[in-house]
Image (spheres, rainbow, N blue to C red):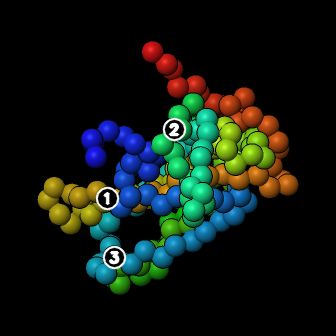
Amino acid sequence: MSGRVLDFKQYIGGMDNVMVEEMVPSLQKTYRYDYGTDISNYNFELSAQTIIVDSIAYDRADGSPNFASSTVLGSYANVDFSATNLNPVSNVAGTIDVTIPAQRYTGNIIPDARTNVPVTVVSVKWTDTNTTPSQTSSHRWAILERYEPDVTIGDPTLGAGYTVIPTS
């Protein structure tokens, strides 16, 4: 491998740091993180930003998305979900529930899984302030936002707040 960015997973952090899922905007999921140590001195952040990808191909064998020829066209502003979607279960035991919220993207969606696809990148970051210097790690989900009947049909690149990525 040449070390160049070959696909979207590598672009946003590699296989170990990102999970790709397809979800409709009204779907919400909660994951329990178990750190196996006291997290009383950890600081957590949960944020999301939606980018629009021009096209997505799919593997014929397993149906997984392939971003090798995808281009990011633009984005919407970053949104902080920390206040309501990070719920410590037990600081001493090291468990916290992280909720990927519903309505993380509220714009238009084309009912076509391959064209101008909104991809919401949700990031949970944790900083261990017990170490010197403090250590920050993150985990990300790239959520391919899919059409459902409650979503307005339309081109997501025409929505209010959309910012085009400038080309040279």
Which residue is identified by label 3?
A: 35
Is residue 148 shown left or right of residue 16? right
- The x and y percentages for residue 52 are 60, 38
Q: From mark 3 to mark 2, how far is it between C-alphas?
A: 36 Å
Secondary-structure class at tag 3: loop
Single out the residue that lies furthest toward the bottom: 93
Residue 46 visible, this orientation: no
Q: Mark 1 is on which residue type?
A: Ser
Q: Residue at x 57, y 30 (%)?
A: 73
Which residue is identified by label 2?
A: 69
Q: Mark 3 is on which residue type?
A: Tyr
> How dense is the environment of label 1, judged by Cα within 10 Å: few (below 14), some, or many (20 and up)?
few
Residue 37 visible, this orientation: yes
Q: Residue at x 39, y 48 (%)?
A: 10
Secondary-structure class at tag 2: loop
Is residue 111 shown left or right of residue 40? right
Q: Nearer the viewer, residue 117 or 80?
A: 117
Q: Residue at x 84, y 53 (%)?
A: 150
- The x and y percentages for residue 42 are 32, 66
Q: Nearer the viewer, residue 168 or 55?
A: 55
Q: From mark 1 to mark 3, how far is it between C-alphas?
A: 12 Å
- The x and y percentages for residue 132 are 14, 59
Which residue is identified by label 1?
A: 137
Q: Quadrant of the C terminus?
A: top left
Indicate whether 129 appears above or below 152.
Answer: below
Single out the residue that lies furthest toward the front: 61
Q: Choose the circle earlier in sequence order: 1 or 3.
A: 3
Indicate whether 24 appears above or below 11.
Answer: below
Indicate whether 156 appears above or below 128.
Answer: above
Secondary-structure class at tag 1: strand
State the mark number for residue 106: none
Q: Mark 2 is on which residue type?
A: Ser
